[in-house]
Amino acid sequence: MKTEIRQSLAECLRFARELGLESTTLNPRFFAPAQPAAVTAAKSAPARPAAPAASPRPDARPASPPSAPTPRRVAPASAGIAAADAFSFSIPAMPGTMGQEPRPAAESLPAIRSDLGECTRCKLHSLGRHNIVFGDGNAQPRLVFVGEGPGADEDEQGLPFVGRAGQLLTDMIEKGMGLARSEVYICNVVKCRPPGNRTPEADEIAACLPFLRRQLRALAPELIIALGATAAHALLGTQPGRGPLNALRGRIHSLEISGWPARVLVTYHPAYLLRDPRQKKEAWKDLQIAMHDLKLAIKPTSLSDGS
Ligand code: URA
């Protein structure tokens, strides 16, 4: 290799190191036998249009983001086109700058509630809703419970889990886990009551899910407990009707909510436990997993005997 090229390459490498670039790949074509002059000239033409005079803000979203960050080529101007052609530098992708979706910053709950407004995004708003039930509790909780959707009492009061199922949930939190209900946050997948307490439909869940996700991102709890199949499938992205809820119980699922690493435990819905109290001991096993995870002291409780 000619001395001047060797020097150019060394300069390029020094420059790359200064930039903190992670890896450098030699371009094999650079070391191929010389090509006829006309072809070489064509290759030297800039492959991309010249950069605009004013550079975009570093956090600006590209108009249509590429699916994966493309390694950019970087070379010092002084190294000249020949040495620049010898390298491909892989630049570590930085969120928001290299075609990755920027991570939305956590919002405040009041901002999310205000964006939800007097929601008419799905048909539930016209099917007898009295109040939107956004959620209730500690805005900086270690633990969040997510139910299915408001029932009649919740629709009436605008608060989650205030009926019979809510009383059992309160017992699970207070008598079972030894926490105050006010220490945790409680919300639902859909914020409006489905008529006749039917299961929310797919389009209703799809309309509400972005708000639940923003809510959870804002709360950023250590653990989320999904109460019942609707909450479990909505949060985990699993298919309703494909296998029993039981298959999702017994372990903590890791997932990402807008770049935030969420952890979800699945248990039975309190309304189901009211219908089949024998399952309370199973729910108690789930609560014990949560308590162990959150390092809460485990005490014997009435929940364990199915009462
Ligand atoms: N059932 C739910 O899923 N949510 C409530 O808020 C009340 C009952």
Image (tube, rainbow, N blue to C red):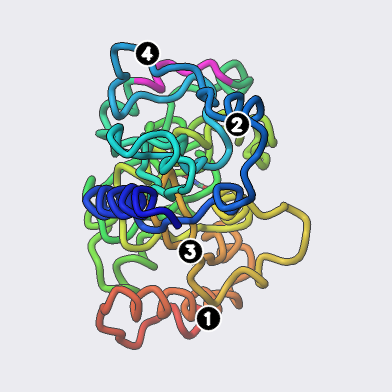
Examine the rendering and report whether any part of residue 221 can be seen: yes
Camera-nearest label, 1 or 4:
4
Look at the image and say whether residue 120 sits in the magenta stretch.
yes
Pointer 2 residue = 40
Q: Neighbour class for label 1 at 10 Å: few (<14), some, many (≥20)?
A: some
Name the spot of residue 292 as percent of width and height, x first. Answer: 34, 81
First to last magenta residue range: 115-121
Q: Which mark is residue 281?
A: 1
> CA gap, disc 1 to disc 3?
25 Å
Nearer-the-camera pick, 128 or 71: 71
Q: Neighbour class for label 4 at 10 Å: few (<14), some, many (≥20)?
A: few
Label 1 beta carbon less than 8 Å to ligand 1: no
Q: Contact, CB < 8 Å: mark 2 with mark 3?
A: no
Taking the spot 36% from the left edge, 83% from the top edge, the residue there is 301
Residue found at the far top of this picture: 53
Secondary element type, mark 2? helix
Camera-nearest label, 1 or 2:
2
Q: Earlier in the sequence, mark 2 or mark 4?
A: 2
Answer with left or right where residue 65 lies relative to residue 135: right
> CA gap, disc 1 to disc 4?
65 Å
Q: Earlier in the sequence, mark 1 or mark 4?
A: 4
Pointer 4 residue = 52
Q: Earlier in the sequence, mark 4 or mark 3?
A: 4
Camera-nearest label, 2 or 3:
2
Q: Neighbour class for label 2 at 10 Å: few (<14), some, many (≥20)?
A: few
Q: Amino acid at mark 2?
A: Thr
Name the spot of residue 111 as percent of width and height, x first. Answer: 28, 26
Examine the rendering and report whether any part of residue 212 can be seen: no
Taking the spot 66% from the left edge, 65% from the top edge, the residue there is 245
